[in-house]
Amino acid sequence: MYNYKLLFRSYPYLLPTLYYLLFLNGCATAPIENLPQIPHQMPGIYPRVRRGETLWRISKMYNVDIVEIINANRIPDTCRIKTGQTIFIPGRRNPRPQAIVLNEEDFCWPLKGKVISAYGQMTGNALNRGIDILAAANANVVASRSGRVVFYSPEFENLGKTIIIEHPDGYSTLYARNSEVFVTAGDQISKGMVIAKVGSAGRDKAAYLHFELRKGYLPQNPSFYLP
């Protein structure tokens, strides 16, 4: 197997390049709000989404992988679940969530604002792999979850000042188009901590945050994780 730590020490420019290839995927059509009720032959239950619940939290409560739930319900990438919606949980017979202690933190919104570009939307020739959140210039940006800053660039292609935080369970979040940044690579960050201020980047002078959430190297729809 390759010794990646040795490789990055020998060629330090490879790490920013790697993050560029993994995270830069363009920038958000209106989400699909209603899903058809899909009949299933496999065992499972049909709980309703309660206020404040996310698809990620539901997957943890019933101890079923989020990908299994997404596939079983044929949920499109651009979809957003809503309160009162019925979700099929495959493989479960008990209608009550498991009484387990969840070690994983929930994700929170990195700032309050209107989503002006959703996950999966085409803008020009680019496909958005995150969401764009409109906010006043210099509004505070907070860490969506606790973790460690693994990347910072003051001028990351067309995304401007960009931060990537790695979380303990294989997830990571990206925060781009910042006017100011208050963290550096290696910093341990707590959920809700102010890490930057909203700004702009490139030729687009509008103030908004570009936010991405990934599991490993795979982009995820933030709407499945944010309350």
Image: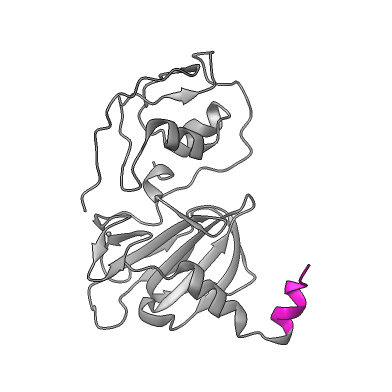
* Residue 216 picture location, percent across and down: 57, 56
Q: Would you say residue 80 is visible in this rendering?
A: yes
Would you place residue 82 above or below residue 224 in this image?
above
Q: Which residues are magenta?
A: 1-9
* Residue 59 picture location, percent across and down: 51, 33
Q: Residue at x 62, y 68 (%)?
A: 187
Decide whether residue 6 is among the magenta residues.
yes
Would you place residue 23 above or below residue 83 in this image?
below
> Which quarter of the figure is the N terminus placed in?
bottom right
Residue nearer the viewer, 14 or 176: 14
Residue nearer the viewer, 80 or 2: 2
Decide whether residue 112 is among the magenta residues.
no
Residue 106 placement, left or right of 135: right
Would you place residue 190 above or below residue 39 in this image?
below
Name the image quarter holding residue 206.
bottom left
Q: Would you say residue 182 is visible in this rendering?
A: no
Name the image quarter holding residue 24.
bottom left
Main secondary structure along the magenta-highlighted residues: helix
Name of the residue lying farthest toward the top: 94
Q: Residue at x 54, y 21 (%)?
A: 91
Name the image quarter holding residue 39.
top left
Q: Residue at x 23, y 66 (%)?
A: 123
* Residue 36 picture location, percent across and down: 27, 28
How does the figure colour the protein chain or chains? Answer: one colour
How many numbered badges does the structure rendering display? 0
* Residue 114 picture location, percent across and down: 24, 54
Would you place residue 105 above or below residue 21 in this image?
above
> Which quarter of the figure is the C terminus placed in?
top left
Q: Residue at x 68, y 86 (%)?
A: 11
